[in-house]
Amino acid sequence: MMKTSLAVAVAIGLASFAGAVDQALVTQANDALARATTYLTTKVASGGGYGGVYLADLSDQWGEGHITRAQNWIQPPGSPSTGFAFLRAWEATGRQEFLDAAVQVAHSLVYGQLACGGWDYVVDHSPDGAQTWYYRHNREAANALLTKGRNQATFDDNVSQHATRLLIAVDQALQQKDPAIHEAALAALDFILRAQHESGGWPQRYPPSGRGYGDFFTYNDNSIADCADVMALAFQAYNDERYAAAVRKCGDFIIKTQLPAPQATWAQQYDMDLRPAWARRFEPPAACGGESVGVMRLLITIALFTGDEKYLKPLPAAFDWFERSKLPNGKGWARFYELKTNRPLYFTRDTYWLTYSDADMPTHYSFQSNWSPQRVQAQYDEVIKQGLAQYKAAREPKPLTDEQRRTSAEAMEPRVKEALATQDATGGWLTTSGDNVPKGQPRLDMGFVQRQMKTLSDYVKLVNGR
């Protein structure tokens, strides 16, 4: 009787909530997600994957640079990011078509997985691509041309990491019932484990080439942080202790690579002897104001993951360095500070001469910025105040009440209506902002599409209570 009464009460509550929202808008949001998915999977996708931005008529496409129609772009907002947009729609609605679209992207990643287990920036579905890159699916190929291509994957710009994340997520959604996706996910994780140096750091590219900064341990662009994040996700998904151990090793690496006081921060990249090293010609060995904020945030994340306070101990000295290293011009911090002297370092715009002057800096790189280390310090202060266990428990996701869902859904309605109003007849969304495409020309920017789909999915999920 009690169970029956509870079920009736829940049903009444859901019905009451449903009556409080604009059901016509919910239907329109569902339909818009379906139209977008149909358009993307049948008209835009190539080999099941995606580029980063397209001309409105799909006659040309780009990643960070130009790519061919047969190529997919892996760096966000390319294929993996689009796969997550489909997964989010599936989680919000339970509709199979969205899961199928995510599976399609996962299979494109399986196709483009290198023999080493990771990914390069591009997956090429053309016959030439199969000879330019040594893909894992060609390992047993009798044709020697299919096993002699490039076989070095990258961790730069969240490439191999995000591809692996999507495979893990789709594998979990399918309950590990797609053998190709499951096997590729585990192979990718084995690759990331192999790439982690005994010191605990990850290089920018792997396997090593023996030349250049690609072999160096790289904090730049959150490369190491993204590797640690994937290992933590993998541990949650597969409960394999090797992945948790990799996260701990990464934390130990961060502790080892903190620069000596009073310059107790981090460099962008380190050589095999864990010394700050040159990368590109405008990336000197130096204390780094930009990437160090991400490193500090990662230390807190690792402390919460492991429950070990030792990963918090490097932070006070780093906060002190930031406090002492503010620029007098009020623009925050320099990206680079000379080792030992702590003087800000810059480069000249055209000649790239290393200089102490910020009068003629290149514009393509953030040589000065406010990276907001105070936000990390505020989080650290709360962790210390509450303790790791309590801080983590307080932030575990909790089910929303009907009132919270209703209020959140109503707050989203203007953005949902805007997304619906701007969806074009094809099912996509065009914008004129962004790079690559000639300025002002309408384009299908996959990052913009993903944000619109996220708005619709989040709204539907709130209403459905999923």
Image (cartoon, helix red, strand yellow):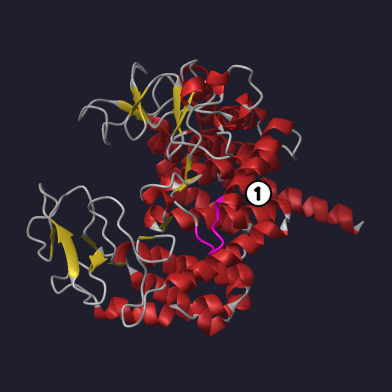
Asked if the stretch drawn in magenta spans residue 258, the answer is no
Extreme residue toward the front, this view: 210
Q: Is residue 42 above or below residue 401?
A: above
Q: In the picture provided, is 57 more to the left or to the right than 454?
A: left
Asked whether residue 204 is in view, the answer is yes
Extreme residue toward the left, this view: 359
Span shown in magenta: 195-201
**Split into 4 quadrants, where in the image is the N terminus?**
bottom right
Extreme residue toward the right, this view: 1
Percent of width and height locating residue 464: 63, 43
Q: In the picture provided, is 344 more to the left or to the right than 403?
A: left
Q: 119 or 213, which is in the foreground?
A: 213
Q: 169 or 68, which is in the foreground?
A: 68
Residue highlighted by disc 1: 16
Asked whether residue 46 is in view, the answer is no
Percent of width and height locating residue 61: 35, 24
The tally of labels here is 1
Label 1 environment density (alpha carbons within 10 Å; few <14, some 14–19, many ≥20): few
Q: 223 or 204, which is in the foreground?
A: 204
Percent of width and height locating residue 335: 25, 63
Three-letter amino acid code at the position of disc 1? Ser
Q: Residue at x 64, y 18 (%)?
A: 142
Q: Is residue 355 above or below residue 424?
A: below
Asked if the stretch drawn in magenta spans residue 196, the answer is yes
Name the quadrant containing residue 310: bottom right
Q: Is residue 366 above or below residue 273?
A: above
